[in-house]
Amino acid sequence: MSFHGAVFIATSLDGFIARPDGSIDWLTERGEQAGDTGYDEFMTAIDTVVLGRSTYEKVLTFGFWPYEGKQVEVLSTTLDPDADERIIVHRTLDGLVQTLEDRGAKRVYADGGRVIQTFLRAGLLNELTITVVPVLLGQGIPLFGELDADVALTHNATRTLGAGLIQSDYTVRR
């Protein structure tokens, strides 16, 4: 694999990235008080963004396109390939990876629960930045799902942000 796979995401304290209906109101309410999360700096080093369909559709509700200047790939078996000229739709992980390799992608931001889980299982992630929001949701869309084997991580750093958010950086050990 020639590209570097990265995750930058927030979860509730009990490990959910969204409510069961996909809502992230619990995050946006507190996120404004967090201060500098390092996201902008993270994004400057990214050349490609990979989203799942649900995350892509969530982004469309923001009222602006947050990935200007980035190559955006969507991994989906159902999204219309001509849905949006700003994205390329891939039906399979193998096809997506081949495109990333062919294009010479350097740093790939994997976003969305299913995409992150798929990338983890396939060994396509190198780093994780996870911000934990001090709220318990009780149910929702989990960040991590079932794995075929343990994924060993090296803890690099943890810092406290505003509003009690805690951010940790990990490297995936190979």
Image (cartoon, rainbow, N blue to C red):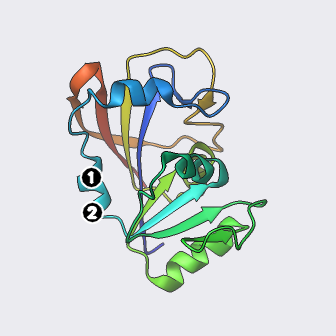
Looking at the image, residue 99 sits to the left or right of residue 9; the answer is: right
Residue drawn at the location 24% of the way across and 45% of the way down: 38
Figure check: 33 above or below 127: above
Q: Indicate the position of residue 165 as horizontal and vertical percent values.
A: 30, 24
Question: Which mark, residue 40?
Answer: 1
Q: Which residue is denoted by mark 2 in the rendering?
A: 44
Q: Which amino acid does label 1 sit on?
A: Asp
Residue drawn at the location 59% of the way across and 52% of the way down: 115
Count the numbered circles shown. 2
User: Extreme right residue here?
Assistant: 78
- Mark 1 is surrounded, within 10 Å at the Cα level, by few (under 14), some (14 to 19) or many (20 or more) other residues, namely few
User: Extreme front residue here?
Assistant: 63
Tag 1–tag 2 contact (CB < 8 Å):
yes
Alpha carbon distance from label 1 to label 2 = 6 Å
Residue drawn at the location 48% of the way across and 83% of the way down: 103
Instruction: Report helix, strand or loop for mark 1.
Output: helix
Rendering quarter of residue 83: bottom right
Instruction: Report helix, strand or loop for mark 2.
Output: helix
Q: What residue type is labelled 2?
A: Thr
Q: Indicate the position of residue 123 as horizontal and vertical percent values.
A: 53, 57
State the quadrant of the C terminus.
bottom left
